[in-house]
């Protein structure tokens, strides 16, 4: 069975500090991995994805994520957090060659304090 | 259009009433997905379409839920005889093609359904 785990319900970080939002996955075969962000009362906005190639993926708004196959992880990172980064972050996985649905993590609320 | 559009933004129904939600995918996108976001932010996949054809309906509670994507019309998700547990935010997403699963799904703003 496919699954995604986001072990932290909430992450608190001070503005200007680096942030990490964790994601681990379990999928048969090779995965495609995605990060989305959800602002209050809004839909999901795509941040970045890992398909193949370089394990470090760069995305929107200065975010990046590192794919680690041995640890089955795809943690989201940003070197310097902004207050405006405060939102709900979702990791999603899709099986390679599965032309279909995402499996989402439960979401991590990021709070960036001034 | 460049964004997935969903209507209405909010919908309130009494238990047992019908609810109908609409989704206009991004122009040129062939795939449409419906997800239900319930308490604790959990996303549940409901159904997907390739153009007007059902692609995967394994997530649909078929006894009360139905969905369609007809040519030249918004896609729709209909719930007959709503129940309290149907209260959720329903998201529609579209993607241009599947490219073996690489393609990003773009999400609409959601319809918040409240069943009283």
Image (cartoon, helix red, strand yellow):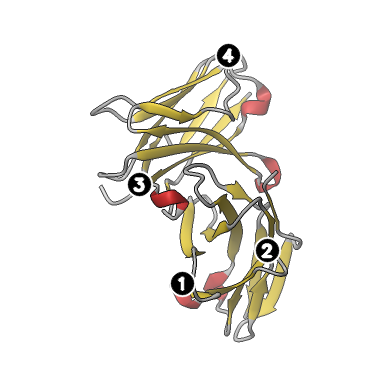
Closer to the observer: label 4 or label 2?
2
Q: Position of residue B13 (x, y in %)?
A: 55, 22
**Residue carrying label 4:** B81
**Residue carrying label 3:** B97
For image coordinates 48% across by 50% down, the residue present is A43
Q: Nearer the viewer, residue A45 or A68?
A: A68
Dot 1 falls on a residue whose secondary structure is loop
Image quarter (top left, top right, bottom left or bottom right) of the C terminus of chain B: top right
From the viewer's perspective, is B97 left or right of B62?
Answer: left
Query: What chain does mark 2 sit on?
Result: A
Closer to the observer: label 1 or label 4?
1
Q: Position of residue B103 (x, y in %)?
A: 41, 53
For image coordinates 46% across by 59% down, the residue present is A46
From this view, report whether residue B19 is shown above or below residue B90.
above
From this view, report whether residue B56 is shown above or below residue B38.
above
From the viewer's perspective, is A105 left or right of B74?
Answer: right
Query: What chain does mark 4 sit on?
Result: B
Query: What chain does mark 3 sit on?
Result: B
Dot 3 falls on a residue whose secondary structure is loop
Dot 4 falls on a residue whose secondary structure is loop
Q: Position of residue A67 (x, y in %)?
A: 60, 70
**Residue carrying label 2:** A23
**Residue carrying label 1:** A59
Q: CA distance from mark 1 to mark 2?
A: 16 Å
Q: Are marks 4 and 2 in contact (CB under 8 Å)?
A: no
Closer to the observer: label 4 or label 3?
3
């Amino acid at each position: 069975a496919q699954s995604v785990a986001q072990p932290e319900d909430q992450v608190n970080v001070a503005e200007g500090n680096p942030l990490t939002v964790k994601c681990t996955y379990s999928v048969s075969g090779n995965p495609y991995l995605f990060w989305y962000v959800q602002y209050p009362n809004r839909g999901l906005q795509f941040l970045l994805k890992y398909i193949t190639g370089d394990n470090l993926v760069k995305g929107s708004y200065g975010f990046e994520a590192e794919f680690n196959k041995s640890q089955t992880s795809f943690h989201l990172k940003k070197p310097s957090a902004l207050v405006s980064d405060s939102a709900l972050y979702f990791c999603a996985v899709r099986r390679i060659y599965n032309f279909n649905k995402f499996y989402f993590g439960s979401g991590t609320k990021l709070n960036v304090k001034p | 259009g460049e964004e997935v559009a969903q209507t209405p933004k909010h919908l309130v129904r009494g238990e047992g009433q019908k609810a109908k939600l609409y989704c206009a995918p991004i122009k040129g996108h062939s795939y449409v997905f419906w997800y239900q976001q319930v308490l604790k932010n959990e996303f549940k996949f409901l159904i997907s379409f390739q153009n007007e054809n059902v692609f995967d309906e394994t997530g649909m509670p078929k006894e009360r839920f139905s969905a369609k994507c007809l040519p030249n019309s918004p896609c729709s998700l209909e719930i007959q005889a709503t129940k309290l547990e149907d209260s959720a935010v329903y998201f529609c997403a579209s993607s241009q093609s599947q490219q073996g699963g690489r393609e990003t799904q773009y999400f609409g703003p959601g319809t918040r359904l409240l069943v009283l």
